[in-house]
Amino acid sequence: MALKPWILTTPASRGIGFELARRLLNTTDLPVVATARKNTDETKAKLLEGLDVDPQRLNVFELDVT
């Protein structure tokens, strides 16, 4: 059984990771897994703001590696 590809962007709550996650959502059809230290619901809403994409393609998980 072949696994379907997906994209991991970490961290994605601001800066380059944020813009990269938005770009990938907008230019691919792949599912995107993003991480943020906190406020995952808020991060997801901001990532999807203004994009015409299926919100189910984006999953945001809490991850703090400090």
Image (tube, grey):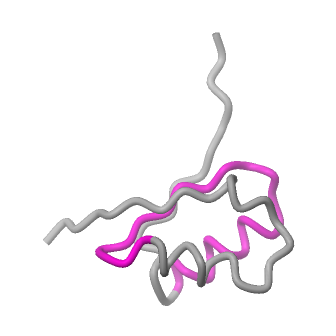
Please count the marks in the image. Answer: 0
Q: Quadrant of the image for the C terminus?
A: bottom left
Q: Position of residue 38 (x, y in %)?
A: 31, 76
Q: As drawn, is 3 to the left or to the right of 54?
A: left
Establish if 65 lies above or below 3.
Answer: below
- Residue 55: say if magenta: no
Rendered image quadrant of residue 21: bottom right
Lateral position of residue 4 relative to residue 14, left or right? right
Name the residue at 49% across, 78% down.
43
> Magenta segment: does it hold 37?
yes
Above-or-below relation of 54 to 39: above
Within the image, what quadrant is residue 27 found in?
A: bottom right
Query: Where in the figure is residue 11, as x and y percent of width and height?
Result: 41, 72
- Residue nearest the viewer, comparing 41 with 21: 41
Task: Identify the magenta region.
Answer: 16-40
Residue extending furthest toward the left: 66
Residue 24 vs residue 20: left or right? right
Residue farthest along the front direction in this orientation: 41
| Extreme-top residue of the structure | 1
Image location of residue 1, percent across then percent down: 64, 10
The one nearer the camera, 15 or 61, is 61
Please give the name of the residue rendered at 59% of the width and 84% of the height, measured from the top-left corner: 46
Choose top left, top right, bottom left or bottom right for residue 24.
bottom right
Residue at 66%, 38% (x, y): give it. Answer: 5
Identity of the residue drawn at 40% across and 59% down = 61
